[in-house]
Amino acid sequence: MHVPVSPNLSRRRVLITGASAGIGAAIARAFAAEGSHLELGARRMAKLEELGERLRQEYGIEVNCRRMDVRDRSQVEAWVEDLAQEGRIPDILVNNAGLSRDLLPIHEGRPDGWDEMIDTNVKGLLYMTRAILPYMVTRDSGHVIHIGSTAGDTVYPGGNVYNATKFAVKALTEGMNLDLVGTRIRVSSVDPGLVETEFSQVRFRGDEERARKVYQGYTPLSSEDVAEVVRYVAAAPPHVNLVRTVVYPTDQRNPYVLHRREEGEE
């Protein structure tokens, strides 16, 4: 039987975007284990509802699922309006939805992929935060947690626009904190290095062989590793704001320095 690590998270309401798989689903499981109630949004409704049902049964919590594309501002605003009317504005907002497309030099880049990344990673984060934050300001409590990336620290070849979106998340985390000084609202980001999820399959547009090679020869972070850091950040005492938490796998020391073992090497 799971014993919650932080009683402070029990019965809190947590909204997570991009929650149907990967890091988002792992974050949902981590908060469910703490007894938090969940508002889950994603585009893949069948996967989302399957996750929600499992969490309800296992933890006895309230889980509400919503088909949601954060790129669509009208969808975001309608969701938050419904939450407000039903008294379910979250205590914690986790802006997890994000993606990368391609790994191409800028002069070969695909503008449709640029639009996806900017609209999801930056504008989607802004739409969600803008819709939720006024309610947090009114009650003078709340926590906004962005899932950033170490790609927001160091640009790498072919990363150009994806790097730019994650640099934007870093800047927005800092800017939001400045705007909210004098309130009890915290804004944090959790910025992982290499994590084995669907990320590379999405980046390489379904090329599973190429995606698999990204994670060969070393031990990457898991979705659960990142979720545990998010839980830790959210559970910090109210007077503590972990503004930016960077987490790498031990085999990686910055975006360029990665130890890959030869086959058979331990």
Image (cartoon, helix red, strand yellow):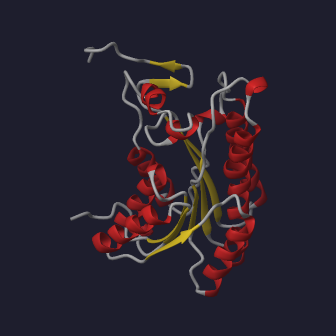
> Would you place residue 122 above or below residue 94 in this image?
above
Q: Tell me the quadrant of the picture where the C terminus can be found.
A: top left
Q: Which residue is at 72% across, 48% downward? A: 174
Name the image quarter holding residue 250.
top left
Left-right relation of 76 to 202:
right
As displayed, is residue 241 above or below residue 63? above
Q: Residue at x 45, y 33 (%)?
A: 208
* Residue 132 in the image: above or below residue 113: below
Residue 245: image quadrant is top right
Q: Position of residue 33 (x, y in %)?
A: 34, 64
Residue 227 is left or right of residue 66, and the answer is: left
Residue at position x 67%, y 48% in the image: 121
131 and 52: which is toward the camera: 52
Please identify the quarter of the rendering in which residue 79 is found.
bottom right
Of residue 13 and residue 28, the one placed in the foreground of this image is: 28
| Number of dots carrying numbers | 0
At which x and y percent is residue 52?
A: 40, 69
Q: Quarter of the image containing the N terminus?
A: bottom left
Q: 162 or 221: which is nearer to us?
A: 162
* Residue at the front extreme, as displayed: 206
Q: Residue at x 32, y 64 (%)?
A: 4
Q: Nearer the viewer, residue 115 or 95?
A: 115
- Across and down, in percent, residue 101 comes to 63, 37
Image coordinates for residue 159, horizontal then vertical, percent:
66, 29
Q: Is residue 60 visible?
A: yes
Is residue 246 at all visible to an observer of this figure?
A: no
